[in-house]
Amino acid sequence: MKKLAKDYPQRAPGSAGDQRLASYVQQQLSGSEGSQIHGFSVQTEDSTASTAAGDRTLETVTATRPGVGGGTVVIVSHRDATQPHAVADMSGRR
């Protein structure tokens, strides 16, 4: 998480930094560009939402993978932050 916060310090909702991190997450989960992660089906969806900085276009990255017991594995997280270098937002810790 610290590396992601360092590599993508400015990621206010809908910002260029948020979009770059969304692309990175998509690439990693889809197994492209040297990623060691495989087996996920990745989709993206854009939507407009009201944020602390006003109305912004947000990109949702969804990754699913068939589970071993007939279920599906779904990864859910947010990646934006209202403060630069926010590690707590990325880790779920306060």
Image (spheres, rainbow, N blue to C red):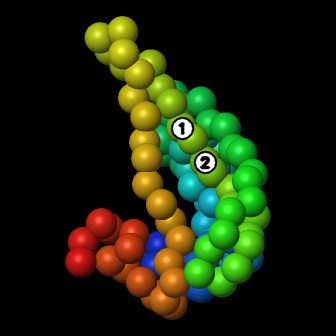
Q: Which residue is mark 1?
A: 63
Q: Residue furthest left?
A: 94
Q: Position of residue 88 (x, y in %)?
A: 32, 77
Please say whether residue 34 is visible from this viewpoint: no
Q: What quarter of the picture does the N terminus occupy?
A: bottom left
**In this view, which residue lies farthest toward the bottom?**
84
Of 4 and 81, which appears nearest the observer? 81
User: Under tag 1, what secondary structure?
Assistant: strand
> Is 22 above or below relative to 54?
above
User: As drawn, is 85 to the left or to the right of 43?
Assistant: left
**Residue 74 screen position, x and y as percent:** 43, 34
Q: Secondary structure at mark 2?
A: strand
Within-10-Å neighbours for mark 2: few <14, some 14–19, many 20+? some
Q: Where is residue 83 drawn, in percent x and y?
A: 49, 89
In this rendering, the answer to whether 88 lies above or below 24 is below
| Residue 90 x %, y % | 39, 69
Visible in this render: residue 62? yes
- Spatial separation of the CA atoms under disc 2 and disc 1: 7 Å
Which one is nearer the viewer's eye here, 42 or 27? Answer: 42
Q: Are marks 2 and 1 in contact (CB under 8 Å)?
A: yes
Residue 21, located in which quarter of the rendered image?
bottom right
Residue at 42% across, 84% down:
86
Amino acid at pointer 2: Val
Residue 37 numbered tag = none
Q: Nearer the viewer, residue 68 or 35?
A: 68
Q: Amino acid at mark 1?
A: Ala
Residue occupied by mark 2:
61
| Rendered residue at 62%/37% (across/down) | 42
Q: Residues within 10 Å of mark 1 (few under 14, many from 20)?
A: some
